[in-house]
Image (cartoon, rainbow, N blue to C red):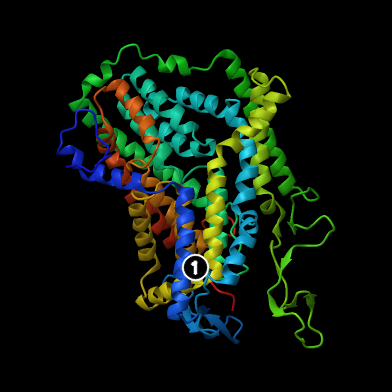
Amino acid sequence: MAPAGMPTHPGASPKARRGPLDWIEWVGNKLPEPALLFALLALLVALVSALGAAMEWSVQPVKPVLRTEMQLQPDGQMQQAPVLDARGVPQLDLVAQGDPVQPRSLLTVDGVYWMLSSALRNFAQMPALPLIFVAMLGIGLAEKFGFFSALMRWLAILTPRRLLTPAVVLLGATSSVASDAGYIILPPLAAALYLAVGRHPVAGMAAAFCGVAGGFGAGFFPTGGDSVLTGFAQDASRVMDPGYTVSILHNYYFKVGSAFTVMLAGWFVTDRIVEPRLNRHHPEDKAAAGDDTARAMALAPRERRALMGSLASLLAGLCLVAAMVLVPGMPLHGDGKPSLPNGRVSTTTAVQLLPAGTEVEEGTTVLATEPFTVVADGAPRLLESPGPRWSHVIVPLIALLFLLPGLVFGVMNGVLRNQNDLADALNHGIRGIVPVLVMLFFLAQFVAYMGYSGLDRMLAYAGGSLLFQADLPIPLLVVAFVLVVVFGDFAMSGMLSKFGVLAPIFIPMFMIVGMSPELTTAAYRIGDSVVNIVTPLNSYLLIILVVFQKYRPKAGLGTLIALMVPYSIVLGLAWTLMLVLWMAFGWPLGPDAPLYYLPAP
């Protein structure tokens, strides 16, 4: 007997109801929603911290250091220089530092007080919070007024027949910038376009779904999801290196290259595997009558004019940004340092909390005296590092560059008529991320509890030491991590929630063996994306199934998953191989985004 509540398909036999994919779907559906999941994980951290403190667990902190040797320089002098392996990668040694780390219990008087008093601060200081909020102002407005919908329809219809598959897949991989619009618009449009040119409509639907879901981690533009990943990665990296900074463009070069890898893989699978098989076994799908999707998706004259005007405004905006970056004397040219309104800069300083009345050494900075003595310890550290001015304004630029064409399209298409329409469009993107904000609140508590208890550092030191002693090649670790994410995707859906669990553990651990946080994030993109098209936990699978059933009414979820399995396999192999080759060539993953983590000398 199948467990109660197990999903079934139309016409499925009792034996089919107990298939592996159905079991996966049933187990996955039993998992809590992301917000509740992180609340339970935070509670688990509190319990484990109390258990660890009672059992006196301890882990020796370690630090990766560059291995150096005296080398003869071209000028004839002997100098200390990093030892490189055969690939030119600097070698690291692992040295112990400081006293063993022990867990600090959250279930004490002070621990419970800290959990309650820090709840709001934990949420407000999440790096992902302002990033995704500001980015979605522009992206959400452009989506609300129909700019993304019109752009995708125009590009798809304009594409020549022989290039239809690569164009559909590439457009799908890029559509993640438009939130959910790619799932809703592109698959039915692609199916109709394929049918209109005499090709199998289900192949068009599959190619679009491959691009939208399988290529979710690729694309040409930074997205709101990239903002959240950036915040998670930076928080996790600072467990090992408090000064480490991750840019929202940390995977940008890799994302652009990945879009073409997804396109080629999807093109191959569609035209060489999926469509020939559909033509042999299911030619009747082409007989769908009354399919006027392509006609319904065609741009009206007013929409076409609005699209041309909005694209012109986008081009003008890009030219203006380029001028501000490249022309001397312009606001974004050269290096800069973000500052506060009073001209000062934000810093953080490690301090020591002592009981009131404690005497301190002369010259020590005392920040407060009642009811505690708070003593400054060490030099302050900049919260925002100096660098190119353009790198400090990426998120506002993303918002503005989507806001501009969205406004132009809304005005020219007649959907932006008054200030109420404008306010509603600005609210649209924020409404879409409300579930993410709820999840972020509980995720913030989970991350903060890990830091307070010391369990994050203990996991990183223990796991990192084991990996270092195993001396596994970094490409092998990358492949292993991709597989971890792939299998995890069958238990927990959601790119952001899953990374929130994995990042605090794996990023510090991999930094010990020389993997940069940016490289860990790139590997995560692959593992998360390639399973999106086959995991039953993907809620959009049901939307695609509705499109599928238009051409094959008896198709079920298992039929759709079986159709998409070749895409998942080929895409996973090709994309992982691309990352390994990327590492072999030593290319950066984005601006100032290295492949390897090299600790300061």
- Residue 339 placement (x, y as % from top left): 78, 58
- Picture quadrant of residue 272: top left
Q: Which residue is mark 1?
A: 508
What residue is shown at x 72% (from left), y 48% (from top)? 326
- Picture quadrant of residue 290: top left
Q: Secondary structure at mark 1?
A: helix
Q: Quadrant of the C terminus?
A: bottom right
- Image vertical order of residue 302 relative to residue 587, above or below: above
- Residue 7 placement (x, y as % from top left): 27, 37
- Residue 87 placement (x, y as % from top left): 43, 70
What residue is shown at x 38% (from left), y 78% (from top)? 469
In this view of the protein, which residue sits in the foreground, 467 or 440? Answer: 440
In this view of the protein, which residue sits in the foreground, 72 or 31? Answer: 31
Mark 1 packing: few (<14 Cα in 10 Å), some, or many (20+)?
many
Residue 485 visible, this angle: yes
Q: As shown in the figure, which amino acid type bears the numbered disc 1?
A: Pro
Image side of residue 177 versus residue 388, left or right: left
Q: Residue furthest front?
A: 109
Q: Residue furthest top?
A: 290
- Picture quadrant of residue 319: top right
Residue 318 visible, this angle: no
- Image vertical order of residue 535 relative to residue 591, above or below: above
What residue is shown at x 28% (from left), y 39% (from top)? 5
Image side of residue 552 versus residue 437, left or right: left
What residue is shown at x 36% (from left), y 17% (from top)? 196
Q: Quadrant of the N terminus?
A: top left
Image side of residue 132 versus residue 578, left or right: right
- Residue 97 placement (x, y as % from top left): 53, 84
- Image vertical order of residue 463 relative to residue 290, above or below: below
In this view of the protein, which residue sits in the foreground, 582 or 423? Answer: 423
Report the number of discs: 1
